[in-house]
Amino acid sequence: DTAVSQTPKYLVTQMGNDKSIKCEQNLGHDTMYWYKQDSKKFLKIMFSYNNKELIINETVPNRFSPKSPDKAHLNLHINSLELGDSAVYFCASSQGAGGRNTEAFFGQGTRLTVV
Amino acid sequence: GEDVEQSLFLSVREGDSSVINCTYTDSSSTYLYWYKQEPGAGLQLLTYIFSNMDMKQDQRLTVLLNKKDKHLSLRIADTQTGDSAIYFCADKSMIKAAGNKLTFGGGTRVLVKP
């Protein structure tokens, strides 16, 4: 039973299109994240949601809009895709609470290629 | 802001020990993590260490933390070909009371030669 699942696994699309990536976790966690991994494997946080509330937004262009309909889901919608958006996008979840170790579980990633 | 640095590449012979090093800048780090990423896969947590510890051992893995120098290392004993992967160091900084952000290093690509 997959803990953090993302769909689709691969996405190839043309510049200018709008696309969405979905993420679901069945761990009962209250915090979910989107990370971007570029072609050089650098991983950077984009967003974090806790109990459906946005708590981290790391200077991501506003073409990227996360949506959390409930605690178990965090979707990422991208408008007007650009070549530079090509990357692997990872969803993650953790039981967020200050101080305690809160291991983040990662999905398998969505490889987005913009042509 | 926070910064985490790692060497890019490590080549090691099967059966030898591997040591992957990491430095970080965030003084308020509470936990530090090592993740493993195999080709085409997501990130798998290998181990973590609380910032008031200086060593943690978990089977073939030994984590050493020098908090004064902000230096973290991961030692893999008896390295196997299945250990070939990219290893990411990450530190957790506190963002508000109910949210945690992981800052990742650039990853160390470990190649194990038979």
Image (cartoon, rainbow, N blue to C red):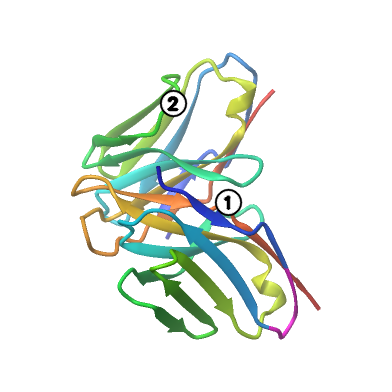
Residues rendered magenta in the picture: B11-16
Q: Residue at x 41, y 20 (%)?
A: A62
**Residue sitting at x 60%, y 39%:** A38
* Residue A17 at x, y percent in the picture: 56, 16
Where's the C terminus of chain A, which quadrant?
A: top right
Q: Give the number of the disc on residue B106.
A: 1
Image mark 1: chain? B
- Residue B111's quadrant in the figure? bottom right
Asked whether, in this view, residue B95 is left or right of residue B83, the answer is left
Whether B74 is drawn above or below A29: the answer is: below
Q: CA distance from mark 2 to mark 1?
A: 26 Å
The residue positioned 44% from the left and 66% from the top of the image is B69
Q: Is residue A2 visible?
A: no
Q: Which residue is mark 2?
A: A77
Mark 2 belongs to which amino acid? His
Residue A34, relative to residue A108: is it above or below?
A: above
